[in-house]
Image (spheres, grey):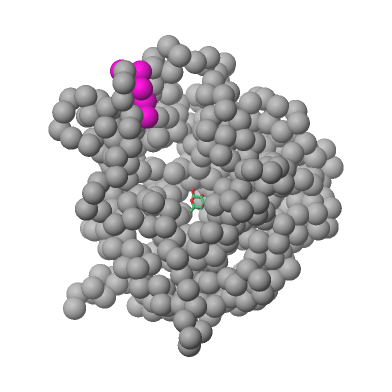
Amino acid sequence: MAKLIFPDHFTWGAATSSYQIEGAPAADGKGESIWDRFTHTPGNIWNGENGDLACNHYHLYPDDVQLMADLGLQSYRFSISWPRIFPAGGGKPNQKGMDFYRRLVDLLLQHGIKPAVTLYHWDLPQALQDNGGWANRDTARYFEHYAAYVFENLDLPVDLWVTLNEPWVSAFLGHALGVHAPGENDFSKALRVSHHLLLAHGLAVRSFRESGRKNEPIGITLNLAPVHPASDSDADKNQARRADGFMNRWFLDPVFTGTYPRDMVEIFSRSFEMPVIIEEDGAIISSPVDFLGVNNYTRIVVRAGSSDDDFMGSPVNPPDAEYTEMGWEIYPQGIYELLIRLHNEYQPPKLYITENGAAFADEVNEFGEINDSQRIDYLQAYIREAWNALQEGVPLEGYYAWSLLDNFEWSFGYSRRFGLVYVDFSTLQRIPKNSAYWYRDLISRNGLEV
Ligand code: FCB
């Protein structure tokens, strides 16, 4: 049996997000978010479900922190719900909302668990949506204001700050494909939204540098996946390059170089209205970050579409592969490929895997246990590839499993379980799955036994 030991300072954690676990949509003065609105609009979510109760983490957070401590988690990545802090997006802050996160962070610190705070995991205040949402450039300024308020008022040590989670998903699933809030189908608008999200990120980083917070790293989390051609044909290879431009480079390039990828600008501008970009935007967006957060679950395989302007192509599911309940291919070597590429091409000072995990149809057996061996295999294979990347000199600093708890999986409602911990949604009882105990052991030996 080989032991793959990680560096001493490596951080092991688990991640969640506000809308997916908190519940309490109107508690203590919280304002409505676009996800509150979207889930309450019929037809959007599997089985008509919503996050009104979710895991009720807003009220059960002390139990959840205890659970994290029992599992030996070294860090916990969660997100702050913007409309808890600014119910109307801007204007008057809601002290009670801030107090909730202060209590949470305080309790984490008491248990020696490092807080990793995401400022935006998709729950925009509905009041800002009513004003045009992310398609309105002003929203970036509102975000800057909200971020600055949190930097000042969450006056406890934070280990990692993430400005935005997966802006690609907010922009395109929310505004072009319409499957996420706010549920729009307008690609030109989605491009504009992507620009304003990037601007919001850059403005928040700038404001962080001007804040009193020192020695705490700030970065952004992107959903990234290797894109492979379905065959060796030139058409498929070119398709893969375009799909990579759309999925990965459209956000990586501006964050690290201040410009959008030229090939994609050409393609997009032939069919869509391009965002208005002001001269200073590139410099704001590429304000130096301390790390890049990588969310990776799978890879993408594409076959050439109908024209050279097709930037998505036809997705292909390789026949002999294994798939999770999301229909995502299990492709562990993809995370290695991705980490090496990011290190070589973009050179972020540090990298974190801020999300990785798998949904399976978990069941509680007659002994009250959840034997999720497929999840253990998945995590082990991906973590092993992360270790391989470390051996190649990639400055990977930590790994966060998605997710701590089974939770509200967006348009899939409660039908997809990603947790290390099982949640019975009728009683809200939490039961650690076997993967949670496996992860606890991995953390205690700081490595894998394979
Ligand atoms: C990511 C999201 C996270 C969760 C996982 C499965 O795209 O950041 O909230 O939905 O996928």
Q: Position of residue 260 (x, y in %)?
A: 43, 23
The residue at the point 29 percent across, 45 percent down is 317
Q: Nearer the viewer, residue 444 or 71?
A: 71
Name the outermost residue toward the bottom.
367
Q: Nearer the viewer, residue 52 or 218?
A: 52
Asked which quadrant contains residue 269, the reply is: top left
Q: Is residue 14 above or below residue 299?
A: below
Most frequent secondary structure within the magenta stretch: loop
The C terminus, quarter of image:
bottom left
Asked which quadrant contains residue 341, the reply is: top left
Asked which quadrant contains residue 430, the reply is: bottom right
**381 is within the stretch colored magenta:** no
The N terminus, quarter of image:
bottom left
Q: Position of residue 280 (x, y in %)?
A: 55, 20
- The magenta-colored residue range is 308-312
Is residue 250 shown to the viewer in this render?
Answer: yes
The residue at the point 32 percent across, 51 percent down is 329
Q: Position of residue 41 (x, y in %)?
A: 70, 42
The residue at the point 74 percent across, 34 percent down is 128
- Lateral position of residue 29 relative to residue 161, left or right: right
Is residue 82 shown to the viewer in this render?
Answer: no
Q: Is residue 92 above or below residue 402?
A: above
- Lateral position of residue 114 relative to residue 357, left or right: right
Q: Report how many numbered discs are placed on residues in the image.
A: 0
**310 is within the stretch colored magenta:** yes
Q: Is residue 134 above or below residue 66?
A: above
Q: Position of residue 428 (x, y in %)?
A: 65, 72
The residue at the point 53 percent across, 37 percent down is 173
